[in-house]
Image (cartoon, rainbow, N blue to C red):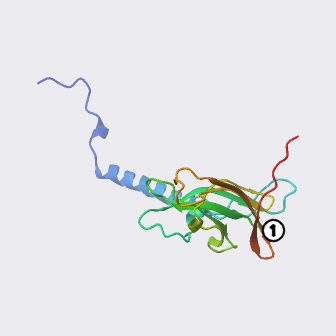
Amino acid sequence: MQQPAVPELAHTTTRPIHWLATAAALAAVVAASGFLQPGSATAAQPEDRTPGTTAHAAAAPDPAAVRFPLNCGPVKVLVQDKASGDLDGDGRPETVAVVRCDAGSGTPPNGVYVLTQPAGAKARVVATLVDPKDQFSVSDLAVRDGAVTATLDGYSSDDVPRYRPDVHDRAQWQWRNGAFVRSTPARASSV
């Protein structure tokens, strides 16, 4: 019988002391990890540390967390666009969302909704700027200087093909006396 080229090593055979040492080391790691936990996670953003600021801005409401007043049947609600800003001058941002049913084909009409989220409460819809029943497609949504602007594309009659809107209107909404008032935004003049 031929002897192996490598002599038999003592540590290749396990004994109860090996299992006891492994269990003790594992218990020590588990106990140490209990003391070295990271800080608590929160949904709040860290405070702004920019010199000259006194407090951080509130986060704008998230449209994904809101139930919109749309009946889409078996299909989901699709948020196509959103913009945020302080629309009512209270120091907290509102979110304006362009929403439609996520149909597999065609172009369902849009709804435009204003969302707010008071401190410690859930986000909710507080105003409808464009109702889907009005049959508009909405594009170029923006929030600037406390005003919401958007382009509304629609149809002059039921005879107009739905893929080719023939009515194009630019609209603006501003918060006045407790309601959003619609107007036509001033056109930029060229020099």
Residue drawn at x 84%, y 62% as measured from the top left: 54
| Residue positioned most to the bottom | 178
Q: 94 or 72: which is nearer to us?
A: 72
Q: Is residue 41 visible?
A: no
Task: Indicate the position of residue 41 as horizontal and vertical percent values.
Answer: 60, 62
Task: Indicate the position of residue 159 as horizontal and vertical percent values.
Answer: 52, 57
Crowding near pointer 1: few (<14 within 10 Å), some, many (20+)? few
Q: Quadrant of the N terminus?
A: top left
Residue drawn at x 85%, y 46% as measured from the top left: 189
Q: Is residue 102 visible?
A: yes
Task: Indicate the position of residue 147 as horizontal and vertical percent values.
Answer: 77, 61
Residue 38 in the figure: left or right of residue 4 = right
Q: Quadrant of residue 134?
A: bottom right
Q: 155 or 181: which is nearer to us?
A: 155
Q: 91 or 74: which is nearer to us?
A: 74
Amino acid type, label 1: Gly
Residue drawn at x 28%, y 46% as measured from the top left: 14
Task: Indicate the position of residue 133 as horizontal and vertical percent values.
Answer: 56, 68
Residue 7 in the figure: left or right of residue 66 = left
Q: 168 or 92: which is nearer to us?
A: 168
Q: Does residue 3 sit above or below 36 in this rendering? A: above
Tag 1, which secondary structure? Answer: loop
Q: Quadrant of the C terminus?
A: top right
Circle 1 sits on which residue? 89
